Image (cartoon, grey):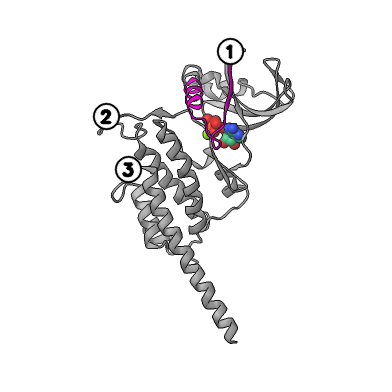
Amino acid sequence: MFKLLYDLFEKELKPLQIVNKKYEIQKLLGKGSYGLTYLVKNLEHNTYAVLKQNRKRKRSKGKESFRNEASMLRKLKHHSIPNLYDIFEWEDSIFLVLERKEGWTVEQLIFEKGKQYDELDAFTLLRQVLKVVAFIHKQGIVHLDLRTPNILFDNNKVHIIDFGLAKYISNHSNKGKNMWKRPVVENDLYELGHFTLFLLYSSFNPDPDGKKKDSWLNELSLQPESKTIVKRLLQLEKPYQSASEVIADIDRFLDKSNKESAAEQELFEVSDARE
Ligand SMILES: Nc1ncnc2c1ncn2[C@@H]1O[C@H](COP(=O)(O)OP(=O)(O)O)[C@@H](O)[C@H]1O
Ligand SMILES: [Mg+2]
């Protein structure tokens, strides 16, 4: 009840409102648990950027996550990761200004645009994401929130956003309790296992006779190589140790699938010529 009232009073910024004399709100892009994200116009440079505002209700946690995101972005200079332009406090909120990346989130592509990923599409996209993830890991950082709303896709290009939960990779293996979201590479790879399942389910048609099979393993009729990749990402089989190890397996799988489809194509052409 109080939470509801608080949310009502915690008004989002409205289009044309100006923040810190410089950023004119264009529209709301997203509402997460820690913050509100807007598309803004920088009135000094006449350019567009993304502005993230922390939620006042989550003040201390939100501020911490924003400061963390800023320090991670400063370390991660890559064309597939937004540049951090500024961090400032204004009217009791903390704001991050980020480079605006083009594209839709993979979540929007699936749920709003009706995009369907078949096996080849899914692994091609996963490979692109893993290339950026390998760079992040090389800098000693894990993202820890690699979900469909945090991956943008446009014009064959992938961008990874939302580094609020990112952490430095821990050297000692603190197994046991709190395994989830430990700052280790395997956790990013595990999340990418779920990401891949999301992609694959976008093109899944349930059995028309309504019979439910026991698990995704049987439900999605995957080729053996790609099934193994997903199982190893999800740690159901020998877990992968690095992003590049996964990329190598995807390359073998894509290479084989491409050769098979080329061979099929040839067969078609031969039978066409005979007719
Ligand atoms: N750099 C960016 N370029 C374009 N869109 C962005 C960018 N950063 C965030 N967005 C959009 O805003 C949404 C929320 O941003 P995000 O950083 O994921 O914050 P949250 O912590 O609220 O999830 C994203 O899902 C995406 O649609
Ligand atoms: Mg997000």
Quarter of the image where the C terminus is located:
bottom right
Residue 48 percent coordinates (x, y)? 69, 29
Q: Which mark is on residue 241?
A: 3
Picture quarter containing residue 29? top right
User: What residue is disc 1 on?
Assistant: 92
The segment highlighted magenta reads 65-90
Q: Identity of the amino acid at label 2?
A: His
Among numbered discs 1 and 2, the one appearing first in the sequence: 1
Residue 116 percent coordinates (x, y)? 56, 55
Q: Which secondary structure lies at badge 2?
A: loop
Near-viewer residue (21 or 207): 21
Near-viewer residue (256 or 100): 256
User: What residue is disc 2 on?
Assistant: 172
Among numbered discs 1 and 3, the one appearing first in the sequence: 1
Q: Which secondary structure lies at badge 3?
A: loop
- Residue contact at pointers 2 and 3, CB within 8 angstroms: no
